[in-house]
Each structure stands twice: as structure tokens, then as C-alpha cells.
Image: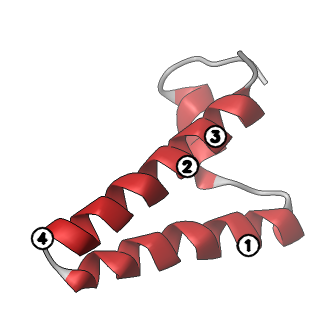
Amino acid sequence: MKVEQIIRAIAGTFILISLILAIKVNINWLWFTAFVGANLLQSSFTKWCLMEDILVKVFKVKK
């Protein structure tokens, strides 16, 4: 699996989990959803993604 596919899977998972937590636990979990969305938007403009750096350095995923 390529790093871009892994990042998309992680972002989608984070968004779905935070939406479920917002419904079941506390509405403030939507801030986490907004954070993930803002990071996706930022990475589209800057071509830099923290999750990519983490995957490459910590988990040795190839680009």
C-alpha cells in the first residue's frame, strides 16, 4: 500500500470515529473532525503532511 492510500484510510477512519463519538459521547468531538479536515486542506496547499512524516519515520513506510 502506498503512503497516500494509508493517509486517506487513516483520515477517513478518524473522521468516522469522531462523528460516532460526537453522536454517542459529546458533541465536542466534532472539533477533532474539523482538525482532521483542516489538516487535509492545509496539506493540499503546502504539499506537507505530518501523518506522512510519522508513517515514513516511525513505521518505515515507503513513499
Of the numbered discs 1 and 2, the one sitting upstream in the chain is 2
- Residue corresponding to mark 4: 25
Residue drawn at x 63%, y 31% is 6
Q: CA distance from mark 4 to mark 2?
A: 19 Å
**Quadrant of the image containing the N terminus:** top right
Residue type at numbered disc 3: Ile
Mark 2–mark 3 contact, CB under 8 Å?
A: no
Q: Measured from the top left, where is residue 18 in percent x and y?
A: 34, 63
Question: Residue at coordinates 38% horizontally, 81% vertically from top-left?
Answer: 31
**What SS does tag 4 mark?**
loop
Residue depicted at x 62% and y 28%: 56
Crowdedness of circle 3 by 10 Å Cα count: few (<14), some, many (20+)? some
The label on residue 42 is 1
The residues bearing labels 3 and 1 have C-alpha atoms spaced at a distance of: 14 Å
Callout 4 environment at 10 Å: few (<14), some (14 to 19), or many (20+)? few
Mark nearer the viewer, 1 or 4 = 4
